Amino acid sequence: MSLVLDRITLQPAGAAPLFAPLSLTIGPGEIATVMGPSGVGKSTLLDAIAGHLAPAFTLTGAVTLDGRDLLALPAEARRVGLVFQDAVLFPHLAVGDNLAFGLTATVKGHTARRAAVEAALAQAGLSGLHDRDPASLSGGQRARAALMRSLLAEPAALLLDEPFSKLDANLRDEIRAFTFAHIRARAIPALMVTHDPADAEAAAGPVIGLTSQGDPA
């Protein structure tokens, strides 16, 4: 299960491409890191892979996941999960119901779905919090809950957009280790955008520095 980017470029309407053609292969359980200045197109790259690219951009190149042509599929069929810097949980749903929202349709029946959610809460160190209001969670608890919701959807690849930047410094190492451990345990490829060199070091995978077409490499 590898995520392969082959000479990907992103070009805004009437402008030059954001960055030079990018080729990258991310293997099972591997976490690749993309770094670069603001505005170079890091988050736009994740949008393109996930299927949420704004119409103002033109994408060239190819993206495959386990041999499937992702660019030919709608976003909901790509099996690509997204984790953002803000651990957003639905405020009108309890913590457990937030996680249940991520469950695939293959988990059928109230009992099975409840058991899957309880198991995920236990893995996240959130046992007993099924009925809690998300607003009552700490920042670290919200981050773990949001990640588990993404993983319950059984993504074949995971995209991380500055996932730890909003966390307090004393939480960053803990949540980073928790996130990376789950990615590796599930053997799914992951692509992370970050400004923090410590994230890239902990990921221990390929690091790609994006520069705009007009900048020196």
Image: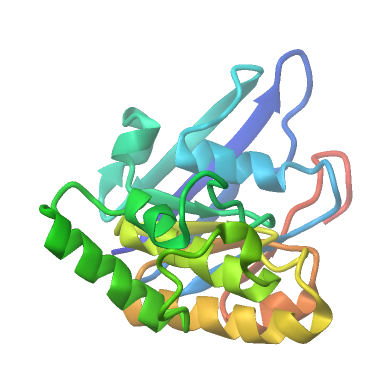
The image shows residue 154 at horizontal and vertical percentages of 29, 59
Say above or below: 110 vs 44: below
Q: Nearer the viewer, residue 198 or 41?
A: 198
Q: Position of residue 137 (x, y in %)?
A: 62, 68
Observer able to see residue 29: no
Front in this rendered view, residue 25 or 107: 107
Q: Is residue 126 something one can see in this rendering? A: yes
**Residue 30 on image: x %, y %:** 46, 74
Question: Which quadrant does the C terminus fall into?
Answer: bottom right
* Side of 36 where 83 appears, left or right: left
Note whether 25 is above or below 102 in the view shown.
Answer: below
**For the point 70% across and 60% down, which residue is it?**
162
**189, above or below 187, in the image:** above
Q: Residue at x 39, y 75 (%)?
A: 121
Q: Residue furthest top?
A: 14
Depth check, front residue: 42 or 16: 42
Quadrant in the rendering for residue 35 = bottom right
Quadrant in which the N terminus is drawn:
bottom left
Please indicate whether residue 132 sits to the left or right of residue 172 in the image.
Answer: left
Tell me where residue 69 appears, x and y as whole percent: 31, 39
Badge count: 0
Q: Is residue 125 left or right of residue 200?
A: left
Which is more toward the observer, 187 or 40?
A: 187
Residue sitting at 55 percent across and 52 percent down?
89
